Image (cartoon, helix red, strand yellow):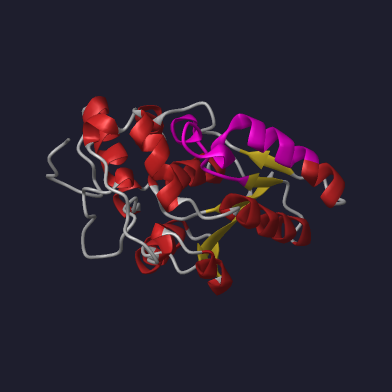
Amino acid sequence: MNSVILLSAGLDSTVAFKHAYDRCKEVLCLTFDYGQQAAAKEIQCATMICSKFDVLHEVIELPWIARFGGALVGTSELPQIEAHELDSEKAVETARGVWVPARNLIFMAIAAGYAENYDHDLITVGLDFEEARTFPDNTREFVERFDRVLEYGTISSLKINAPLIDMNKVDIVRLGVLNGAPLELSWSCYRSGDAPCGVCESCLRRARAFAEVGVEDPGRPGAIAP
């Protein structure tokens, strides 16, 4: 098997990357720059991951997505949430603030083009159960329906590989530790910088997961768990 991998260098995509890397003969990683605040850091970390494992990597610029607006691309403030609110209705509400219209749909369609062109079998994505509660494009139903789209939209037998689709962040950290994913090179923060901000929702979810597993986050050594 060969796979195109969507690699933002976040916790989820980094663990999904290693899962596919261990099972595929060839992989091609795609990282997208769509004007998001964390673009520079995501590209830097994804490049380091691909270099470490000596795999092909391409950065695709989609500047027009920034015109859609939203907190991730810096046209509004990032919504703030407390650690104890991560499983509350407030988390569902704040998700709208970082929603980028049809982002995963766009990314996966582009990946399908690459996969078909390079005769790859799979498109590997880091979609997971925990984020499916707040983002409809992280659900198992989304993956199953996109597989159906691929049947009609390509002439190849492409399939979506979503190894984390039934996992929460705790499960993902455990898998990442178990399979030797390069967690020290991953970047979950919504912002760029020398260090993660530690207060955005993505940072909070990551910190909670590492704390519950009981291991230090190699991407943020010495950090205090929420």
In the visual, does 222 lie left or right of 26?
left
Residue 78 falls in which quadrant of the image? bottom left
Specify the quadrant of the image occupied by residue 146.
top right
- In this rendered view, identify the residue nearer to me: 121 or 201: 201
In percent of width and height, residue 3 lies at 64, 49
Q: So how many labels did they put on this image?
A: 0
Instruction: Using residue 197 as the reference point, say whether residue 24 is left or right of it.
Output: right
Residue in front for this viewpoint, 102 or 14: 102
The answer to whether residue 178 of the structure is visible from this angle is: no
Question: Split into 4 quadrants, where in the image is the N terminus?
Answer: top right
Judging depth in this view, the residue of 217 and 189 nearest the camera is 189
Q: Nearer the viewer, residue 22 or 152?
A: 152
- What x and y, as percent, mark residue 108? 65, 52
Q: Can residue 217 be seen? A: yes
Secondary structure mostly taken by the magenta-highlighted segment of the chain: helix
Using the image, determine if residue 81 lies above or below residue 120: above
Q: Residue at x 48, y 44 (%)?
A: 18
Residue found 34% across the figure and 35% down from its top: 90
In magenta segment, residue 143: yes
* Picture quarter with the C terminus: top left
Where residue 139 sits: x, y (%)? 58, 33
Range of magenta residues: 124-148
Question: Residue at 67% of width from left, 41% of height from top?
Answer: 160
Q: Position of residue 200 (x, y in %)?
A: 27, 49
12 is within the stretch colored magenta: no
